[in-house]
Amino acid sequence: MRGWLTRVTPPGLEGDDLIQEAYTKLASLATVSNITQPKAYLYQIIKHLISDHIRRANVISIDAVAEMAQLSVLEEGMTPERILSGRQELERLYQAIARLPGSCRSVFIMRKFDDKPQKAIAAELRISENTVEKRMSRALRMILEQLQTNKEGRENAASPEPAKHKGRRDA
């Protein structure tokens, strides 16, 4: 079995670890009386363990993606323009939150800033979870609309229309 494992085991796995894990799986079975071919069964368990390892290895963790994103940001460099732009975006977000109706704002802050679960917010405010959900949706929609309006206003200000001169001819 060890010879076969050295040929088929992918990098990052040890043959002895696979054998140990396979024996652990066998030991955890309630009964082994229904296994007619123990050697084939053991090989099958090991094949499944290898498949599971390969499947997990092909999935990239969220942490790894976040680290790669952070590295690309560091490579691009934080220019003064990008820092200022980020601060301005954050200020627009704070202003949009401040413009929310009080009921929506409190639910939004509790959920997004205080990281409270919906059920806890409902209990604290003495409202139904459904109401919390509706207020949260309304808050998000209003913030998005406000940010879109701000963005469109900035874009229009950045590209002025050519001035029209009525009744004047330049010769």
Image (cartoon, grey):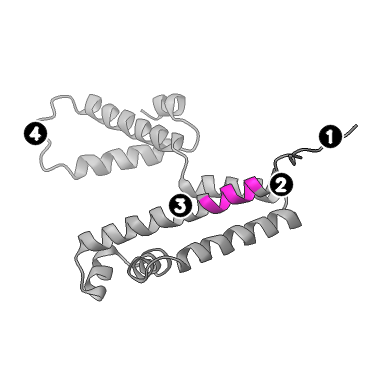
User: Which residue corresponds to the image point at 56% horizontal and 54% vertical from the top-left?
Assistant: 150
* Residue that numbered label 1 is attached to: 169
Amino acid type of the residue that numbered disc 4 sits on in the rendered structure = Ser
SS assignment at label 2:
helix
Number of dots carrying numbers:
4
Residue carrying label 2:
76
Q: Are marks 1 and 2 in contact (CB under 8 Å)?
A: no
Tag 3 secondary structure = helix
| Disc 1 versus disc 2: nearer the observer | 1
Q: Nearer the viewer, mark 1 or mark 4?
A: 1
Q: Disc number at residue 33?
A: 4
Name the residue tied to disc 3: 145
Relative placement, left or right, of 159 versus 2 is: right
Q: Earlier in the sequence, mark 4 or mark 2?
A: 4
Counting residues from the start of the chain, the first of labels 4 and 3 encountered is 4
Q: For mark 2, does the 10 Å Cα neighbourhood hold few (<14), some (14 to 19), or many (20 or more) residues?
A: few
Q: CA distance from mark 1 to mark 4?
A: 103 Å
